Image (spheres, coloured by chain):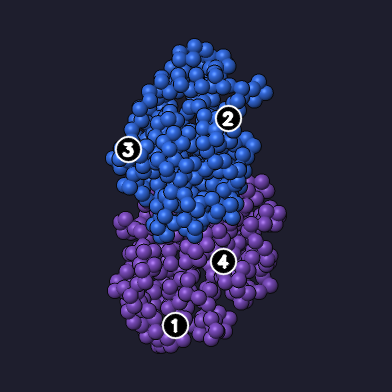
Chain colours: A purple, B blue
Amino acid sequence: MGIGLRLRGARALITGGMGFTGSNLAIGLVNAGSDVTIVDAMIPGYGGNLFNIAPIGSRVTVNFSDVRDVNVMNHLVRGQDFVFHLAGQVDHILSMSDPFPDIDINIKGTAVMMEALRRHNPSAKLIYTGTRGQYGAAVSLPVNEEAATNPKGIYEISNLTAEKIIQVYNDAHGIDAVLLRLTNIYGPRAQMRHPRYGVVNWFVRQAIDGATIKVFGDGKIRRDFLFIDDAVEAILMSAVSPAAVGEVLNVGIDKPTDFIELADTLIEVAGSGRWEFSPFTPERKAQEPGDFYSDISKIHRLAGWAPRTTLRDGLGKTVDFYRAHKAHYWDSDG
Amino acid sequence: MGIGLRLRGARALITGGMGFTGSNLAIGLVNAGSDVTIVDAMIPGYGGNLFNIAPIGSRVTVNFSDVRDVNVMNHLVRGQDFVFHLAGQVDHILSMSDPFPDIDINIKGTAVMMEALRRHNPSAKLIYTGTRGQYGAAVSLPVNEEAATNPKGIYEISNLTAEKIIQVYNDAHGIDAVLLRLTNIYGPRAQMRHPRYGVVNWFVRQAIDGATIKVFGDGKIRRDFLFIDDAVEAILMSAVSPAAVGEVLNVGIDKPTDFIELADTLIEVAGSGRWEFSPFTPERKAQEPGDFYSDISKIHRLAGWAPRTTLRDGLGKTVDFYRAHKAHYWDSDG
């Protein structure tokens, strides 16, 4: 049975559903015939953007609320078949100057959700989207799910903690859960007002604006940049895979790219912008985990997923989207 | 230079200082000539007990407050040479029915302390006492500090998270820290009113009361039970060791004991009590990590510490203490 059939008529709650990954996931689910409720707290500076769900408009239920709100979460989880738990503080830099939003939203908010499921809907399946930052620096490449987890920031720690909390609810309380660790995702519907949410999208904005992209260091650091449509497919395919329950799964792309190739390809695709080398600031250097790309054989084996979009195609779609809808994502003031 | 000389005149703050490990540590520090301030929130049911510090009475400063109190922690860290951060929710069973105290006290409280140090006393050294439960089940024995960390409960997750937060403050903000993972500790000054804080001390209470000790399963599960005086020495020696800064160190004992040997030795030493086999409850079985004992070669190499107390001697001292002071630790009502 294909994904579409398994999701048709399913009831799905998406926390952080107005954000980058959440809104793209909502669109994917609505198009697959699911009955989707979006939860978003619309915290200023985070990823929530009403324009993100323009394509599905009235075909989705929107509930503005915060994952830390116990009573609201207890109410909203009832009757859901799937809970896609994406809400969170996701800015590494912010987490290093103020650890409390990450602890409060990402850790405590996750516990609120798991308690809501335990008490009010233990048969729902929860899908969590963590980050490859949970690993810290790669000890060997590609990085598989058994690698040591030595996160370099509070944000990344908070994701690891949320994952481990969910794992305990899966193991001890019988709440089925799938634990994803997402690599660098890029594409339409991201937060584009500041550079702290994803380097590829920030490069795209600069290319569209005809600005000069800064490539740090020697530009040879390699990453696995994944297009959002592939990420959404990974989330949906692992959500419907019985073999993925209770498992930690990397979501990445097996073709790492260095920053020079990224900048060159982007500028060629966009037909605008330029790039130059820039030295690392000491703080950035200390936090820089170096080369990183994921071993994605486990999710392929358990859920049948593999990425399908080339960097060139993904960048092309991203540039086209923001060229068409730029006014909804940034303006001359920021 | 010996430990005593390095601690003489040092200013030390101990959070959770009225509890089991904290009060024994306070006694050790005062006897070494340190200027000690105890912080304790005296949360009912936790380990705080005024009688614990009877031996040092007026030679210690006591400040009743909660580690989550930002303003108080900001004030108290000033001028300290050492902060021994021991305060926390430590009941695994409670953490499985209510995850919020662990998140709030153990995780957020640790962030409050690290922010206090970063802003008001970045040259102090912080010593954190986590748990061997951070590892979860042992993959191979003995368990060294590189082993995978798959904790089986929210309490153990909260300790792992606190450790990782502190590690980030050590690495990124320059707050010197030592990260200990303590095995099962037993001895005087523990919480003895309920059985959820440490199996050896609970056995001791039953032996003293002439009750029947329940040995779960076949009694062959092995653990490394460490006497509190050895644990205090490990904490102090790692606190003054420059090589221990930024390191995770196991604190255990290289002689594992099974539960039958523990019960037999205890009953012989106490001259009272008896034991019988008891089947695991399903919940206990699911949470039981099996054989576990720590590789303690790293702390020996970096801080020169090794345990010195045999199980028989440690149990003897423990029985003697509680026989003499039983009224301060439990009564017929609990």
Residue type (three-letter) at the residue carrying disc 2: Phe
As drawn, the residue found furthest toward the top would be B271
Q: Which mark is residue B155?
A: none
Please provide percent x and percent y for residue B136: 45, 40
Do tags 2 and 3 sit on the same chain?
A: yes
Mark 4–mark 2 Cα distance, whole angstroms, equals: 54 Å
Look at mark 2 in the image and give the residue it sits on: B51
Residue type (three-letter) at the residue carrying disc 4: Gly
Look at mark 3 in the image and give the residue it sits on: B2
The residue marked by circle 1 belongs to what chain?
A: A
Please provide percent x and percent y for residue B57: 55, 33
Q: Which mark is residue A22?
A: 4
Look at mark 1 in the image and give the residue it sits on: A206
Q: Is residue B245 left or right of residue B130?
A: left
Do tags 4 and 1 sit on the same chain?
A: yes
* Viewer-side residue, B293 vs A50: B293
- For mark 1, give the secondary structure: helix
- For mark 4, give the secondary structure: helix
Q: Residue at x 62, y 52 (%)?
A: A112
Contact flag, marks 2 and 3 (Cβ < 8 Å): no
Mark 1–mark 2 Cα distance, whole angstroms, equals: 66 Å
Q: Look at the image and tell me whether residue B93 can be seen.
A: no
- For mark 2, give the secondary structure: helix
* Viewer-side residue, B309 vs B5: B5
Please provide percent x and percent y for residue B298: 31, 41
10 Å crowding of disc 3: few (<14), some (14-19), many (20+): few
Mark 3–mark 4 Cα distance, whole angstroms, equals: 58 Å
Contact flag, marks 3 and 4 (Cβ < 8 Å): no
Q: Is residue A58 left or right of residue A144?
A: right
